[in-house]
Image (cartoon, grey):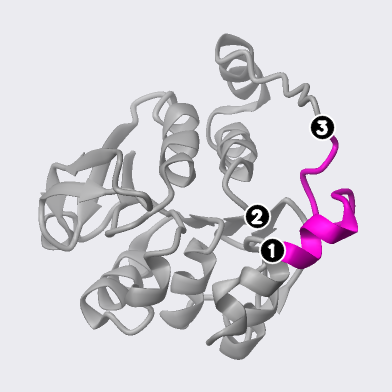
Amino acid sequence: MQIALLLFDRFTALDAVGPYEILSRAPGAETVFVAESAGEVRNDNGSLALIADRSLDDVPAPDLVIVPGGPGQSAQMENEALLGWLRRADATSTWTTSVCTGSLLLASAGLLEGRRATSHWLALETLKEYGAEPTGERVVTDGKYVTAAGVSSGIDMGLTLLGRIAGDAHAQAVQLLTEYDPQPPYDAGSPQKAPAAIVEEWRAKSRFLLQ
C-alpha cells in the first residue's frame, strides 16, 4: 500500500506529521512525501522543513492520499498542477483524505461535491462554496473520503483509517505505542468549549473572512 502525503509551501506541520506517525505503521505501507517539485518544503512559519522525496508526477496512483492544511492552502486553490494530480490520484485511490483546511483543496478539485466533510472550524462554511456539506464532527467518513477537523484531529483520522485498513487490534496497538491518551490542561479545543472572547478574536482575524 502506497501512502502519498502531499506537501506545499506553508503547510501546517502537525497536519502532515500526525497522520504520518499513525498510518506509516500500517502493515506493508510505503509512505512517500510528495510535492509539485521534489525537495525541501517549509511549514507555515518557515521554521521546519520536510523533504518531498518525489514529485507529483513520480507518484501517479497512490493507494491512500493525505492532504494537510495550513495557511499555504489558500495559494493552492487554483493551482491546476496540484488539483489535477489530486483528481488523477483520486481516480484510482482506495482512500482520499485530508486534515484541517486540506479539505478545501479536495473540494476545490471537485472531489467533495455533495459529500459530508469537515475542516478547521474557521473554514467550515467555505466548504459550502464547493458543494460540500460541512459538519463540525472531528472525523468524517463519506465513502472513501475521510476528512479531519483542525490540526490535531489528523491523529484521530489516522487511527480511524488504520482501524479500517488493519483492524481494530492493530490500531489500538499503535495508539498504545504512541501513547496517544490526550489529557489537555484546558478544555478549550473547540469553539463550543473555548471562552467566547477568544473564539470571537480569532474569527475576526481569520483569513477566510477576507476571501
Question: What residue sits right under mark 3 in the picture?
Answer: 186
Q: Which residue is labeled 2 in the image?
A: 149
Count of labels in the image: 3
Instruction: Choose the circle earlier in sequence order: 3 or 2.
Output: 2
Closest to the observer: 159 or 62? 159
Queried whether the magenta region covers residue 204, the answer comes back as no
Give the main secondary structure, helix, strand or loop, of the magenta stretch.
Answer: loop
Q: Amino acid at mark 3?
A: Tyr
> Which residue appears at 69% of the width and 57% of the height?
140
Q: Which mark is residue 173?
A: none
Q: Is residue 105 in sight in this rendering?
A: yes
Near mark 1 (Cα within 10 A), the count class, few <14, some 14-19 or many ≥20, is: few
Label 2: few (<14), some (14–19) or many (≥20) C-alpha neighbours in 10 Å: many
Quick one: 4 or 8, which is closer to the camera?
A: 8
Tell which of 147 and 196 is nearer to you: 196
Tell me whether the residue at label 3 lies in contact with that at label 1, contact meaning CB atoms closer than 8 angstroms: no
Residue ID for mark 1: 202
Q: Position of residue 205 (x, y in %)?
A: 62, 70
Q: Earlier in the sequence, mark 3 or mark 1?
A: 3
* Cα–Cα gap, marks 3 and 2: 19 Å
Determine whether 188 is above or below 81 in the image: above
* Horizontal arrangement in the rendering, residue 45 relative to residue 121 (left or right): left
Residues drawn in magenta: 187-201
Q: Is residue 136 visible?
A: no
